[in-house]
Image (spheres, rainbow, N blue to C red):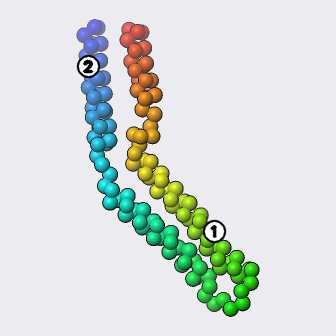
Amino acid sequence: SGSSLLLMFEEKIQELEAIVGSCNRLLSSPIPPTYTRHLSRVLFMWLCAFPISLASIGTVGTTMGVTMATVAKHILGPVLASSVAAYVLVGIDEVGMEIENAFRILPLQQIAATAQNMVRQQFVST
């Protein structure tokens, strides 16, 4: 029973080493900076062009009379739509950046302390 317990511990330690090795490979594999730069530039260009395209679609066929209703319809509408689109898309980009750097946002110290306490409890209970 003592040798089977040691064998079980050895297997668990090997599994843990394999998991730690996988985490180290994930942490050390860099994300190409060109991907992040390219995404940011495309997002910036699209967000700059979006209100212009909305305003140009809205002004087709309008008369020269400028009223508060036409200003609200042709300027405030595209600005509001662009602001909502920018908030959503930049938020998605930010979430993607956080996911790419998962090890920086995970509570690794607490996870390690919990695992250590669980192992300690296993030793005490046997």
Give the labeled residue for mark 1. Answer: 80
Label 2, label 1: how many angstroms apart (C-alpha)? 61 Å
Instruction: Find numbered disc 1 in the image and state the secondary structure of the residue it sits on.
Output: helix
Instruction: Find numbered disc 2 in the image and state the secondary structure of the residue it sits on.
Output: helix
Residue at image point 65% right, 79% down:
74
Crowding at mark 1 (Cα within 10 Å: few <14, some 14-19, many 20+): few
Answer whether labels 2 and 1 touch (C-beta < 8 Å).
no
Q: Tell me where residue 45 appears, x and y as whole percent.
A: 45, 70
Identify residue type, mark 1: Leu
Give the labeled residue for mark 2. Answer: 10
Identify residue type, mark 2: Glu
Q: Quadrant of residue 38?
A: bottom left
Q: Is residue 13 above or below residue 22?
A: above
Q: Is residue 61 above or below residue 78?
A: below
Horizontal side of residue 11 vs 70, given as left or right: left
Which is more toward the observer, 57 or 1?
57
Q: Tell me where residue 40 appears, x and y as whole percent.
A: 42, 62
Horizontal side of residue 102 vs 63, given as left or right: left
Residue at image point 68% right, 91% down:
64
Crowding at mark 2 (Cα within 10 Å: few <14, some 14-19, many 20+): few
Residue at image point 43% right, 29% down:
109
